[in-house]
Amino acid sequence: GGAPSFPRAATNAMPAQPPRAVPPTAIDPPIQPSRAPVAPVAHAPAPAPARPSAPPPRRSEPAVTPSKARGRVVVIAKSGADGPSYPLTDTLDIGRQEGHLIVAEDPYLSPRHVRLVFQGDKLVLRDLNSTNGVYLRLSPADRGERRGTALPKVGGLRDAESGVVLEDGDFVLVGQQVLRLEVLGDGAPGDPLSEHGTLVFGTPAAPRYARLSQRSVEGMTRDVYYVRKAETVLGRESGDVVFTEDPFLSRRHAALRLVGDDGAPLANGAGGRRARLALVDLGSSNGTFVRVRGDVTLRAGDQFRVGQQLFRVDLDADRVG
C-alpha cells in the first residue's frame, strides 16, 4: 500500500498550557478551555504526545488532598519526560468539554472520553463510548485477559518484546497509522475462479489469514494489506508493510504473528491448526497500541492514549492491592 500523507502529528505541536484539572467533586460545569495540541491524525490519537509547557495547570478549586489520592495520572511530554500529574481518587474522567481533566482544543477527544475508576483495589480504564476510542500501550506483562477475554500469553517472545492476541475488528495504532484487523479464516487459499468451465489465468493463490485496513481522517479505507505468513512486520524502512513517510514509526516497529490457541508461535503457518494473530511490539521508540474493548484493569506504569494525549498511571503501592 502507499505511504500515508497524514498531517504532522502532535509531537510537533507545542501547546501553550497543559490540560486543566477539575476536582473530582466538581465535574460540571467544566472549567474554561486551555490551549491544547491541535495537530490532526487519522481519526485516532497521534503516535507521540504533545509536550505541555512549563506552567502548572490552574485549578478552579483547591486540589484533592494527598491523603485521598491512590495514585496519579502523569502527562507524558514530547521528550518522554514526565509532565504535569493529577491525583487519582475514586474516579477520574478525561474529556474535551466535561470531566475532571479537560483538554479543550484536542479535536480528537470526545466531550467526555474516558474514565479511570477504582473497583475495590483495582484501577479500571473505561471508554465512555468515545468516537476515536482509548488505546492501551503494549507492555511486556500483557496478557489476553487485560482485554476482557481469557486468552493465553503469547509465547516465544524476547524480553524486549510484548504481545497480545488480537480479535476480529480490533484497531491497532502504530506511528500515525490506524489499522483495523479483519480475520479471514484459517489461511486456506480460495478456490480458483472459472468462467464457462475455463479457469481464470492469474497469479497463484496464496494463504490469507487476515487483512489490515488503513483508516484515513476522512473515515475511509485508504489501503488494504494482507497477512499471508507466519510473521508480518510493520515498519518505516524494513518489513512487509512499510510506511516510509511516517516519522513516528521505528525501522521495524511491530509484527503480527500466527499463534495457536496455546499462544505458541506457528512458525510454518497454521498447518491445519486453528490460528490466531498476536500483535508484538519490536522494541519501538513510540510504542504499539491496541484499542481497548470493555473495561481493562490497569497496572502501575501502564500508558494509554486518548485523542492526542499520552498518559501514564502511577499507583501507590500502600493504597492499591
Image: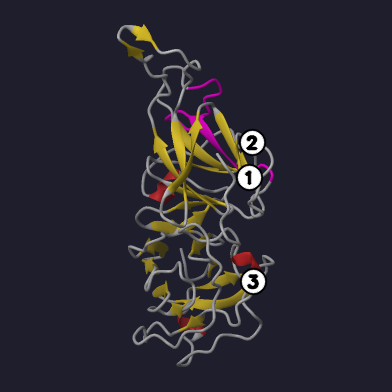
Q: Viewed as shown, does residue 311 lie left or right of 186? A: right
> To which residue does mark 1 refer?
253
Secondary structure of the residue carrying tag 2 is loop
Three-letter code, disc 1: His
Q: Position of residue 170 (x, y in %)?
A: 41, 46
Q: Viewed as shown, does residue 24 lie left or right of 315? A: left
Q: Residue at x 36, y 57 (%)?
A: 295
**Earlier sequence position, callout 2 versus callout 3:** 3
Answer few, some or many: residues within 10 Å of disc 3's Cα (few below 14, many 20 plus, some between 14 and 19): some
Q: Which residues are magenta?
A: 251-269
Measured in 3D between alpha carbons, the distance from the residue under mark 2 to the one under mark 1, in whole angstroms, is 9 Å
Q: Are marks 2 and 1 in contact (CB under 8 Å)?
A: yes
Q: Nearer the viewer, residue 42 or 162?
A: 42
In this rendering, is residue 101 above or below 225? below
Secondary structure of the residue carrying tag 3 is strand
Three-letter code, disc 2: Gly
Q: Residue at x 40, y 56 (%)?
A: 296
Q: Nearer the viewer, residue 269 or 249?
A: 249
In the rendered image, the residue lying farthest to the front is: 196
Mark 1 or 3: the one toward you: 1
Answer few, some or many: residues within 10 Å of disc 1's Cα (few below 14, many 20 plus, some between 14 and 19): many
> To which residue does mark 3 refer?
82
Q: Position of residue 175 (x, y in %)?
A: 59, 53
Is residue 258 located in the magenta-colored stretch of the structure? Answer: yes
In this rendering, is residue 234 above or below 197? below
